[in-house]
Every structure is written in C-alpha cells, then in structure tokens.
Amino acid sequence: MTGSVLLRVRSAHSHSGRCPVPMGIAPRLQGFLVASRSSEPAIGAATAPAPSARTNALVLTLMSAVFLSLLDSQIVATALPSVVSDLGGLDRFGWVTTGYLIGGSAAAPVYGKLGDLFGRKRVFMASIVVFLVGSALCGVAQTMGQLIAFRGLQGIGSGGVFICVLALIGEMFSPREGARYYGWFSLTFGAASLAGPTLGGILTDLASWRWGFFVNLPVGAVVLVVVSLMLRLPVQSKRAHIDYVGVVLLVGAIVGLNLLTGWAGVKYAWSSPVILGLAAGSVLAVVLFVLSQRRAVDPVVPLRLFANPTFSIVVVLGFIAGFVGLGMINYLVLWLQTVLGLDVQTSGYVLTAMMLGVVLTSWISTKVIGNTGSYRWFPVLSMAVFAVAAVLFSTAGPGTSLALAIVYVLLFGIAGGLNSQALSLAARNTASIRDIGAVQGTATLMRQLGTGLGVSFFAALMTARLGTGLQERLGGGSGVRIDKNGSLSPEVLGHLSDSVRLELADIYADSLRSVFHAVIPIVLVGLVTALFLKDIKLAGGHGHRHGSAGPEQSGDDSATAGSSSAARGES
C-alpha cells in the first residue's frame, strides 16, 4: 500500500511489500498453531525440573529456522522495488510474494504427513535443504520469471520448515510441558516482523537485494549441523505408504483455491470464465481428495481425525479466526488511511501496536495455559473480543480520534493472540504420536484457507459498496476514479479539493462499515462454536526414555498422555 490513501484491498496477495508492516506474512500468523510433547513434569508441578541448556539450545535452533522462514518474507517485501528495477517485470512482481505463499500453503500438510511416515527429523532437514537451495537460486536469478519460479521452490521449503518444527516440538514434549516453548513462536514472529523491513533495507542499500536471499545460507547451514548432532528421535521402522493421489489432489486444490482468492474480483471478474473454472476445478479437487482419503492406506489427512469433536471444533474455529482475524488486516489499513487520513508511516505504527498485541497476548496465554492445563475459555474470549472490535469499528468514522483507533486496532490484535495458542494446544491434545504432523498440517491449512477466502469475501463486499457510494454521492463529474481493487492513485488524490476528500472519507467509512457488519455474525457463530469446545486437561505425564512412546489416554477427546524423554533432544 502506498500513499496516504493508496489502497490495495488485495495487497496480501500481490503488494504485500508496500506497507510499513508488510502483510506478506499474514498467512503465517497461523504459525502460532503450535503443538508439543515431553516427559518432564507439567508446568506448575512442584517437582518440575527446569529444561536443560542443551534442550533450550536445540529448541532455539529450531526457532531460528522458523525465524528464517518468517524473516524472508519481510526482507523480500522491502527489497521488491530494487528487484523490479534490476530485473524488470513490473506486471508480474506480485508473483514474487504470491508464489512463495502458494508454495508454502501447498507444501505444509504434505510435509506434516511425510514426517509422520518417515520421521520428522529427516523431513525437517530435507525442508531446510529445499529452502536453502531455493534461496541460493533466488539470489542468482537473472529474470523475473526465474525469480518467481525459485521463490515457489523456496516457499515449498519454508512451508515444510514451519510444519516440521511444530511437529518436532509436538514429539519432543507433552502438550502441557511444551507450553514452556510456545511463547517462543510468538516472540519469533514479532522479532521477524520488526527486524525484517530494517534488515531488508540495510542489505539492499549496502549490498544488493540478492543478499536478502544469500543471508539465509549460513544460518540455515548452522541449523542443519546443530539439529543433525543434537536431535535424537526414534527411527521409523514401519513400511510407509505414500498417498500419491491424495498429495496431487490436495496440492491441486490448494493452488486452485489460492489463485481463486487472489484473482477473483481483482485480476478477473467474479463471473469470468477463468474464475468460474478455478472455482469448479477447486471444488472438484476437494471432493476427489476427500473420496481418496477414505481409500488410502496412509491418507494425507486421516478422516478419522474429524471423528474427534474437539479436533473438528478446532478446525472450524481456526478457519473462522483466519477468515476474520487475518482476512481483515487489509481493511484495517484501508480504514486508517482513508477514513482517518493517516499517512503510510503513521498507519504502520498503529499496525505495529496491533502486532505487538497479537504477540504479547499469545505469549501470555501460553503461560496461563501451561500453568493451568486449561485452554477452553481462550477461544471463547477471542471470538467475543473480535465481536466487540467489529461493533466499535462499525460505529466509527472520520471523527474518531487516533487514540480510539489504536484501541480498536489493538483489540483485533488481542483477539487474534487469544485463540492462536489455545487452538493449537487443543488440536495437539487430541493427537497420538503417529498423527502429530497430519493434525498440525490440517489445522494450519484450514486457517490459511480461511484467510484467503476472508480476503476475497470482504473485498467483494467492500468494492461493491464503494462503487455504489462513489456513483451516488460524487457522481461522474468529480474526477474520482477507482479501479477494480478499490484503489485511488496519489495523482488523482492530489487534484481533489478538500470537500471532495472529506466526502471520500465518509464514502470509505460507509463501505468499510459493511465489512465490519459482516464480521459480527461470523464471529458470533465462532463464539457459539467455541462454547462447545470441551476443556480436556492437557496431557503432561512422564514417559519412557530413549524415544519410546508412553501410554495413551482413551475417550472421546482423549490425548496421548505418554511422552518421550526430554533426553531425546539431548542424547
């Protein structure tokens, strides 16, 4: 987003690098979907020993891999203008971000299942290698087409890194004990979001944009060495059956849905043959995928997971959280810049406050959940706060003070932080050791899909209302023209009178009000759904050493209670 009211409704898909807090990582907020497993006594137990320095060092190394994955999006977003200046391809540069996101989305659930089948350590290391190879190739790309292709490869590695780290911690620690480390994901996300733009600018100015990719290589190499030497997990001895048909259908469905949500109403009209074809193809792929999972020996997404009501509710809540929480980010920026008339820098500061709200609330929630073993009321509170924030925004307008605007935006951040860890813990608490990767991949995928569909839905709603408002209140002689993205160019704005600008602020406020009104019933559905979430205490008992799995609890919402020794990460 550029200019005080240069508004790209779909910037999360194509122009993520233009806002002061780049939105390209928005789909990765689902990175807070963390799960864990260990044999140390639960947090809060009187005899619980502190984790060893080697365990902390190992988890810190895993967090470094996640940090690289998140940081890369920020650095590249900042360097995109230099990339375009060097390679050209202005009409395609949005794919530098989109290709990375699609690659990561498509790869995540597949990596999760591969880790379940072949061992999470080796699959994690393979994903790091893919990420580093993609980074090196991006750094030497000579054309925009090459860069886009290599970014897709890099994204495939990045998606694997993220899911594999979630699954690795899920295997190393019990859900309750792992809460020691859940806050590390929140802090990693915050650090990457804050450091990325600055580091990207420094590397681009002092060296070149290519070093934004090359910087991944030494850090990634260290991660590979440390994990190879320090992490010890049981070797998979069973024969694996790869569900090739399921993988192809799932990847096809994910790519189709990502393209659909990125193009619909932006590059192509909703009624265009391309969009209708993508919609039909995506639906067909989803149906065929579900049917294939019923017949597969080792399905990518075991349908038996959904027989557990807790897991099913978590998936629904994750979808709604992505639809509303992440899908609304662009429209919060839109509101700040058009309704309040804030410039890019100031609106960036406000978004930073929201991001800090997400990080701090998520971190605090992990501490509380770890101490109590209870997660139920966090999703409920999250949906309630979402509803309150939407109501407040629906009553706000150009006369709203900046202080109140910050409070409203902060509420959205708090709501997002309240559900991220709780949903992850609830999902992990339903998983046996053999399904950790599948559980993490499925939950993350549903949140990502919710985000994409939310952006598309709100875009269609806002732009339709905006076009009508401009026609009714300004008519055809005002000189105001918006494109199909709902954007106004700085050149047009510079020639508008003060009275027209004020009228525009009211029109945008009315248009965005329809978006906030639409959020309210959606989050109320989420609130009612969250009330059905059972409060199954997080598993946190002792397990056997040398990587063996402990006993499992049984019941409708049972979780794997046993865990491997903490020494598994130290032997």
Image (cartoon, helix red, strand yellow):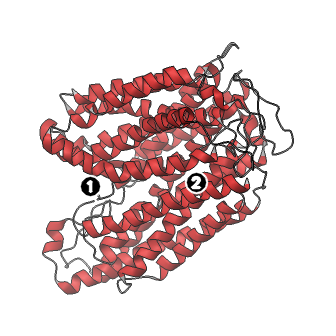
Q: Residue at x 63, y 47 (%)?
A: 179
Q: Nearer the viewer, mark 2 or mark 1?
A: 2
Q: Residue at x 35, y 83 (%)?
A: 398
Q: Residues within 10 Å of mark 2 (few under 14, many from 20)?
A: many
Q: Residue at x 64, y 26 (%)?
A: 116
- Residue 507 placement (x, y as % from top left): 34, 79
Tag 2's secondary structure? helix
Nearest the eye: 540 or 273: 540
Q: Number of numbered discs present?
A: 2
> Which residue in the structure is indicated by mark 1?
18
Q: CA distance from mark 2 to mark 1?
A: 26 Å
> Which residue in the structure is indicated by mark 2?
420
Residue 440 higher or lower than 228, as above or below: below
Q: Amino acid at mark 2?
A: Ser
- Residue 537 placement (x, y as % from top left): 78, 51
Nearest the eye: 419 or 254: 419
Residue 500 has which mark? none
Tag 1's secondary structure? helix
Nearest the eye: 520 or 200: 200
Nearest the eye: 11 or 208: 208
- Residue 221 placement (x, y as % from top left): 37, 25
- Residue 245 placement (x, y as % from top left): 59, 22
Tell me the quarter of the image containing the C terminus: top right
One can see residue 536 in this view: yes
Whether residue 538 sits left or right of residue 333 in the image: it is right
Q: Residues within 10 Å of mark 1 (few under 14, many from 20)?
A: many
Q: Amino acid at mark 1?
A: Arg
